[in-house]
Image (cartoon, rainbow, N blue to C red):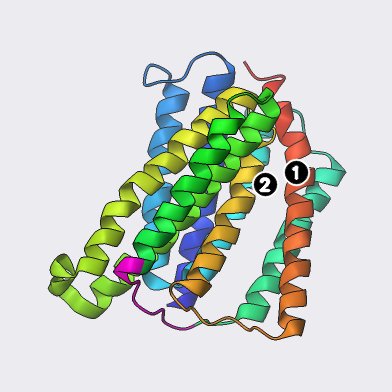
Amino acid sequence: MLALSICLALAAAVGYGVATALEHLAVSAGAGGWRDPRWRSGILLDGVAVLLQAAALATGPVILVQPCLVLALPVALLTAWRLGAARPTGVQYGACGLIVAGLAAFFVLVGDPGDNDPLRLRTTLVTAAVLLAAGTAVLTYARRWPPRARATALGLVAGCCAGLAAVLLDAVAAAAHQLGRDVLTDPDAVVAAVLLVPSAAASFVLLQLAFAADGLGVGYPADLIADPITAVLLGALLLHEDIPHTPRDYAVFGLSLLVIVAGVTRVSSGVTSMDRGIS
């Protein structure tokens, strides 16, 4: 089941990456909306990717599924090139290698984290309230910032919302597996399901606003960094998914994260070329 979950997560990353390139193409051309076939294709592909991600979370732990989605950035870069953007450079290909290497090290260290614990009602509400307050404060201040800084803030908050939504979906899927039909009357599962919808919707809307503010230059990479970090932290703290926690393990985790962030940063320097040469 774990191998199936990872395969589904990788397929979702491909779907998200291609969808993002298509949606950005429409937005950067001054179009967007259902009248633009590229936008429609992107949104529909996003829907397919969501289903694949949901299936991955239903069969595997969020702390392994969600980090896979960072691969959507290299996919978006390559898709943009095929749609007419500048050809990726050797540095960008190397950055893609860094992302893969960082993820591989993370997966080897984590191994199989096993089943998660049920998400408790009080913990769910407190976590959602804290993230809502923090996200609202950041976005309130960001309204006065320059476009790139504002796009970064939008991407980070979008990623946090996506990470929370993934944890909620993982918890609902686990509850459904354990409780069967009784999940419909379980207050913990019901609250998680109710919060899941606005969390996912906020992630999507904020990411689109980041695109509008600065294309894919900084908002999308920020989203892809914040998303797995939030999911891993909440998965470990709230769902008690088992991950190694010795000082050496934390050092390897930190190094893996730095490698991934470095790769994302370098790849994103070429993603801005999607704003040029595509019409």
Q: Quadrant of the N terminus?
A: bottom left
Name the residue: 56% across, 23% down: 212
| Picture quadrant where residue 141 is located | top right
Q: Could you say which is closer to the camera, residue 27 or residue 48?
A: 27
Q: Is residue 210 left or right of residue 275?
A: left
Name the residue: 62% across, 23% down: 144
Name the residue: 50% across, 31% down: 208
Q: Is residue 41 left or right of residue 110?
A: left
Q: Is residue 91 left or right of residue 118?
A: right
- Looking at the rendering, the stretch of residues picked out in magenta corresponds to 114-122
Residue picked out by circle 1: 267
Query: x and y percent of residue 123 in the render?
Result: 38, 68
Residue 74 is labelled as: 2
For the residue labelled by badge 1, is the local secondary structure a helix, a strand or a loop? helix
Mark 2: amino acid: Pro
Name the residue: 30% across, 66% down: 172
Mark 1: amino acid: Val
Label 1 near label 2: C-beta < 8 Å? Answer: yes
Does 52 appear in magenta? no
